[in-house]
Image (cartoon, rainbow, N blue to C red):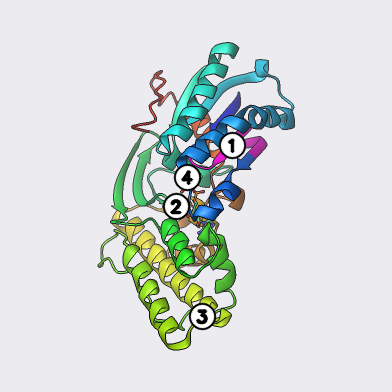
Amino acid sequence: MVVLGIETSCDETCASVLCGCDRVLSNIVSSSLSLHAPYGGVIPEIASRAHLEVIVSVVDAALKEARVAPKDIGLIGVTQGPGLIGSLLVGISFARALALAWGVPILGVNHVRSHLYASFIEKKILFPFVGLVVSGGHTSLYRVKSLSHEEIIGSTRDDAAGEAFDKVAKILGLAYPGGPVIEKLAKQGQSDAFVLKCDCGSGIDFSFSGIKTAVLYKVRDLKKVYGALKKETIADICASFQEAVVRDLVAKSIRAVHAAKAKTLAVGGGVAFNNTLRQRLASACQKEGIRFCIAPHEYCLDNAVMVASLAARLFRSKKHKGRVRLDPLTG
Ligand code: KG4
Ligand code: ZN
C-alpha cells in the first residue's frame, strides 16, 4: 500500500510518500524557521500562515519525487496533535480535502508517538519496549505494550530537554534553535569546565528548568567579573550543559528499561539528533545488554515519514478500530 503522510504540527510543513511502513519514496520538509529566528522561538500565527502558503507545493513535490499519482495512494496519514492548533488545522483540513477528493481513507496519528516509532523504520518492533521521546516540546519515557497501548512512566516536570537547549542558547546569545548550535560549540569546549547538574531525584522524571537557571546565573556572574564572555567560555558552558543533559537522559532511560522489565530502548525526537546523546545511549545499552533503536538522523526532527509510517502500521494492524479520529485538541 502506498501511503501519503502530512505533518504540520509546528514550524515545518512536511509531506512524504511511503510504500508500506518502511520504504521511503519521498520526504519533503519546508521549514519556516528563518521567519521565527528573529523572535528566538516559534510564533504560532506566522507558522500557520507559512503552512498555508506552501502545503500545496510540498505535497505535490512529495508525490512527484515518489513518482506516484493520486490514484496510487491507498491511505493518508496526518498529524492530529499535539501541536500548535492553527498549524495542525492546516494539515488536517488539507489531508481531509484530499481524502474526500481521492476517495481514500485517512488516519490521524499522534505526533509524539510518531516520533517514537520513527526509531523502528526498517527495524522489527519487539514489544514491550521503553520509549524515550526527547524533543522541543516533550521529554517522556513510555512503557509500550503494543501499538495501541503505552503508559507514561517518566516525564519532565517543567521544561523539555530541547526547550532547555533553546533557552540556554538564548542566554548565551546563540541562534535559534539552540540544539544544533550548542552541539557544535560543545565540541570545542571542556565538559568538566563548569559544574552543572540536572536535578530530579533518583526516579525517572526529568527537570531541566534548574540547569537553565544555573546557566543564567553563571553567565550573569561571569559577565560581572569579566565583561562579555569569551568564545572559549561559551564553548565550555555548552559542553558542560550538554554533558549534564546527556548524562541525565542516559541514566534515566536505562533505569526505566530495567524498571519496566523491557529489553529494548527506542528513542526519537529532535534532541535524538545529538551525536553525543546517540553515542552515549548506544554504549550504555550495549553495556547493559539492551537492544537499542534510535530514529535515523533524517527522521529525528519533524518529518512526515514518521507520520506515514505509523499510519501504515496502525492501518495494517487495524488498531485504529476503523475510526478516523481527527481532533487537534486531544491529539
Ligand atoms: O522534534 P522536533 O523537531 O520538534 C518538536 O516536536 O519539538 O525537536 C526540535 C528540538 C529543538 O528544541 C532543538 O533545539 C532540538 O530539537 N534539537 C537538538 C539538536 N537538533 C535539534 N537538541 C540537541 N542537539 C541537537 N543536535
Ligand atoms: Zn516533533
> Most extreme residue toward the bottom, as rendered?
225
Residue ID at (39%, 30%): 328
Precedes in sequence: disc 2 or disc 3: 2
User: Where is mark 3, residue-wise?
Assistant: 229
Instruction: Identify the element where label 4 is drawn.
Output: loop
| Residue 130 vertical placement versus 307 (above, below) | below
Task: State the separation of the CA atoms marked 4 and 2.
Answer: 14 Å
Q: Residue 43's mark?
A: 4
Residue ID at (57%, 79%): 231
Instruction: Identify the element where label 3 is drawn.
Output: loop
Q: Amino acid at mark 1?
A: Cys
The stretch in magenta equals 10-28
Residue ID at (41%, 71%): 244
Precedes in sequence: disc 4 or disc 3: 4
Q: Amino acid at mark 3?
A: Leu
In the depicted view, which residue is nearer to us: 48 or 143? 48
User: How many residues crowd around disc 2 within 10 Å: few (fewer than 14), some, or many (20 or more)?
Assistant: many
User: Where is mark 1, residue-wise?
Assistant: 14
Q: Quadrant of the C terminus?
A: top left
The percent coordinates of residue 103 (x first, y second) are 56, 11
Task: State the separation of the CA atoms marked 4 and 3.
Answer: 29 Å
In the depicted view, which residue is nearer to us: 70 or 230? 230
Q: Is residue 125 visible?
A: no
Q: Residue 136's mark?
A: 2
Instruction: Identify the element where label 1 is drawn.
Output: strand
18 in the magenta segment: yes
Whether label 3 lies within 8 Å of ligand 1 gets the answer no
Residue ID at (51%, 28%): 90
